[in-house]
Amino acid sequence: MLCLAGSALADTRQRILDECQQILQTAVRRPYGIAWGATSGADEPRNPPPATVMLWPQHTPAAGLMLLWAGQALGDATLTQAAVQVARGIAAASESTGRIPSTASFGRTALGRDPPQLVPDRASTCAGLALLLSVIETSPKPDPLLRGAALRAAHWLVRQQTRTGLFVASHPPHAPPERSIRLVRLDRPDYRDAVLALILAYEVLEDAAMRIAAERAVEQLLKLRYQESKSARGLWHTAFDPDGTITRALPQFPRGVDMLATRYSMQALLAMHVSQGTQACKVALDQATERIATLPTQQGQWRRLYLMVRDEVVTLATTQPAGDPGSPPPFAPPDRAPDPASEMGSFGLDGVLEAWNRLSQTDRVKYAQRLAAMLTYRQQIAATLVGLSDRPLGDHLPTSPQDSRDWKPSTQNRSRDESARCDGADPRFGPAPQGREIVGESALGTGPSATFFPLQQARW
């Protein structure tokens, strides 16, 4: 969308403006801000009843960021002010602790509606914080209300770390407290996004506590890598106990190299290196890249999970430890291997490896300047946190409708993850309402917004 918004074609600019207006027509509007919910706010009566709005990634924060960028690119103050009102709505819904709820009731006041969880979900806080920071950064005179909400949200994130600096989450996600345990999950974007949010908050708000928290989280991420294995050294497992040891109590997390966890971890290290020039991140990225190159692939695709025996990677065909041909055959994996062990794909790793390859050939300042030709790295981080992208700090962005269609699968996993909040796993959510697209399918597939960061079909 931004690529075409910067063009001189009047009809293209008008189409983008029309799509933004269509988005705004469906917003739930209140005196303290606007947001989007399960039903359109276009036909609300003069004194509307409370409406449930959605504040997690790919919903209200994503729409707000799209409006902000479109307003800046088009020079349209109406769209920019609408983005500010979205940020004010998120600030109004934030809790006294600073946490931004996933869902809120927009009535006379904004009230969070999240059910209790063993570990509060951080996705909506990271997404809302990204929009708040983006508005603050681009405002000539930042709104004290928005800055205060951003500070509280960022400090809430800091307080969610364990004593050592890890970010734990509830497992299963979104389950009631009595049916949950605490785990560190690296195969989900949660840990990565917490690091990205802290980096962005430090750079915009200039609060050293956020930089320190990000550094501690990254330091622990480095400690979670396999250290003693020849074939897996420098890569990551799926899940860990809160003390940082590999979880052994759950059979769905067998010992192995998880390529999705490795991808998210490398993205966090990449962001830390670009932002702060952390040398340990550079060394870890080099080591991970070299180790990934030694893993067996099929037609250029990796396994989601490379099972391990005796601390070495095994192939399901031979069960022979990789990198150790002279050792006796280990015990074969179970007859029914876990689903991740048979799942094949790129898992977004190709984009991470490409970005690191280009960054390693120059210095981080020049790489950041290269990114800024389209989006600054801060904008890329914000886009990732609100769910418009899942490839932070990559220098290839969609510039055509076909690129847009190829781009969409990178965020489909997040779409499924966010929709799980209302998939019936927790009866306290009640029946899931019918899904409503914030941006219509025609806009996603053929309209001008299809050329840049298409908003996914965001459904309950």
Image (spheres, rainbow, N blue to C red):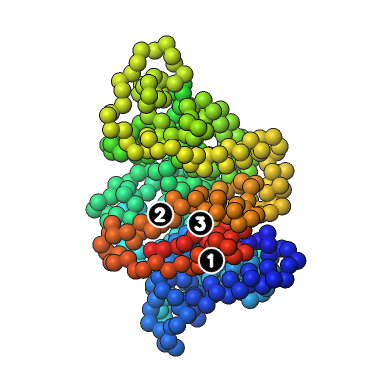
Query: Marks 3/2: CA distance?
Result: 12 Å
Which amino acid type is shown beneath numbered disc 2?
Arg
Which amino acid type is shown beneath numbered disc 1?
Ser
Q: Residue at x 55, y 54 (%)?
A: 405
Query: Marks 1/2: CA distance?
Result: 21 Å
Camera-side residue: 36 or 319?
Answer: 319
- Name the mark on residue 442: 1
Q: Which of marks 1 and 2 is in front?
A: 1
Q: Residue most toward the right? A: 8
Vertical arrangement, residue 41 with respect to residue 447, above or below: below
- Name the mark on residue 403: none
In which quadrant of the rendered image does the C terminus lie?
bottom left
> As drawn, is 323 to the left or to the right of 381?
left
- Name the mark on residue 387: 3
In which quadrant of the rendered image does the N terminus lie?
bottom right
Write down the residue under mark 2.
416
Q: Residue most toward the bottom? A: 46
Camera-side residue: 187 or 378?
Answer: 187
Say which element carries label 1.
Answer: helix
Q: Nearer the viewer, mark 3 or mark 1?
A: 1
Camera-side residue: 39 or 309?
Answer: 39
Query: Marks 3/1: CA distance?
Result: 20 Å
Instruction: Work out whether mark 3 precedes mark 1 in sequence or the reverse, and give the earlier one.
Output: 3
Q: Residue most toward the top? A: 326
Say which element carries label 3.
Answer: loop
Q: Residue at x 66, y 39 (%)?
A: 359
Instruction: Work out whether mark 3 precedes mark 2 in sequence or the reverse, and give the earlier one.
Output: 3
Camera-side residue: 370 or 197?
Answer: 370
